[in-house]
Amino acid sequence: MKRWTTSGGIAIERLNTLRCNCYVVQCAGAVYLVDTGVVMERQSIERQLKKLGISGLDGIILTHVHTDHVGNAACFQKKFNCLVYVHAHERTALRDGCCPLPRGTIPITRKIVRAAGVLGLWTCFEPCRNVMAVENGQYIGPGMRVLHTPGHTKGSMSLILNEDIALVGDAIIHRSKQVYPPFANDETQVKNSLQKLLETNCQQFLPGHGMAAGREDILGALL
């Protein structure tokens, strides 16, 4: 696990997961889980929460609705009796338990998407019923601001913490020198969202896949 703390005292812990980064955010006495990973990692996530001394969640925040991010949302919602927050554009998909695949932005990911579509992979998950839709600029907790960052999906959102650290979902993917997302529905919106992130005062950007990125990494993706 890796830990960050914002200038305002919000604590962020990245859990050890393989498929999708999941973050525990502790703010003003409340505990939130940002993205929930896939079903096969459920027990591992539960063990790590226990190791952190966390016995309850005040909310689950989803950066977007894809199966690798929402796989445990319904289960954890029931287990911890908490709200699930998602951007308004993705509430219906979350409640229906079905999401479309994104497009690929490079040749190899376009092939992956075509193959997955033929096989019917990665589109269905257990639906969530008690869903709180949020909008751009809304605060989920003190110093926890929603920034709508569409492109990967229509309702993708980032969480700006104390205007210092951003949890950005799949707005970026940082597994190599590049951070430009390999999957996205609208590349114009991707670039606009990267610019939005640079317009914040955040110095660190924690993605849904890969390691933390800095401002220079995002700037490089726009050049």
Image (cartoon, rainbow, N blue to C red):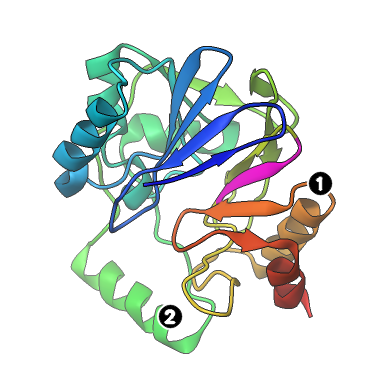
In the picture as drawn, the residue positioned furthest to the bottom comes out as: 107
Is 186 left, or right, of 137 in this rendering? left
Marking on residue 200:
1
Q: Residue at x 43, y 44 (%)?
A: 65
Q: Residue at x 52, y 57 (%)?
A: 170
Is 84 left, or right, of 155 in this rendering? left
Distance from Cα at disc 1 to Cα at disc 2: 31 Å
Q: Which residues are drawn in magenta?
A: 163-168
Please tell me whether residue 165 belongs to the stretch shown in magenta.
Answer: yes
Marking on residue 110:
2
Q: Residue at x 41, y 38 (%)?
A: 93
User: Counting other residues with Cα less than 10 Å from the Cα at mark 2, is it few (<14), some (14-19), or many (20 or more)?
Assistant: some
Q: Quadrant of residue 192?
A: bottom right
Q: Quadrant of residue 185?
A: bottom right
Q: Secondary structure at mark 2?
A: helix
Q: Secondary structure at mark 1?
A: loop
Q: Amino acid at mark 1?
A: Thr
Q: Amino acid at mark 2?
A: Arg
Q: Is residue 46 above or below residue 118?
A: above
Marking on residue 104:
none
Which quadrant: the C terminus?
Answer: bottom right
Q: Position of residue 132 (x, y in %)?
A: 51, 20
Q: Position of residue 177 (x, y in %)?
A: 57, 80
Q: Earlier in the sequence, mark 1 or mark 2?
A: 2
